[in-house]
Amino acid sequence: KSYVFAIVFAEYILRWLPINTHEWEKFLSPQELEIFANKNNLISDETVGMKYNLLSKDWYLSNDASVNYISTFLKN
């Protein structure tokens, strides 16, 4: 899902970003980011998904963090 929306749609179809901006192999899921953060003395505070509405051209917060998300962490 993240490959299709973040790379195929954003780069190739909608042309919002230059082609090859993203490298899908380097994408981190929220779970992978949390593991990395925990190993570096950080505690997950919150992860919130972000979605884009093509009609209104606005970003909004969502429970779906499968493509775009924001995470905050606290120092342990």
Image: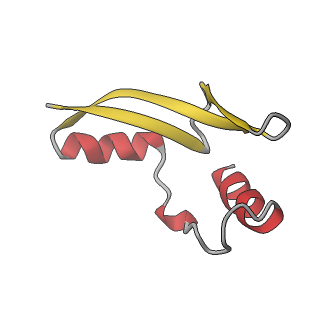
In the displayed structure, would residue 9 be above or below residue 51?
below
| Residue 55 position within the rendered picture, expressed as x and y whole percent measured from the top left | 85, 37
Q: Residue at x 77, y 58 (%)?
A: 9
| Coloring scheme used | secondary structure
Q: Quadrant of residue 46?
A: top left
In the depicted structure, whether residue 53 falls above or below residue 29: above
Left of 57 or right of it: where is 30?
A: left
Residue visible at 61% across and 45% down? 67
Residue 37 screen position, x and y as percent: 27, 43
Q: Number of callouts in the render?
A: 0
How far from the left and from the top, in percent, is residue 47? 45, 30
- Which is more toward the observer, 26 or 54? 54
30 vs 63, left or right, is left
Q: What residue sits 52% from the left and 39% below the top?
A: 69
Looking at the image, is 11 positioned above or below residue 19? above
Residue 41, image quadrant: top left
Q: Which residue occupies the extreme bottom position in the image? A: 20
Instruction: Name the foreground residue: 14 vs 5.
Output: 14
Q: Position of residue 45 (x, y in %)?
A: 32, 25
Query: Which quarter of the rendering shows the C terminus?
Result: top left
- What's the residue at 41%, 36% (across, down)? 71
Measured along the vertical axis of the image, is residue 51 above or below residue 16?
above
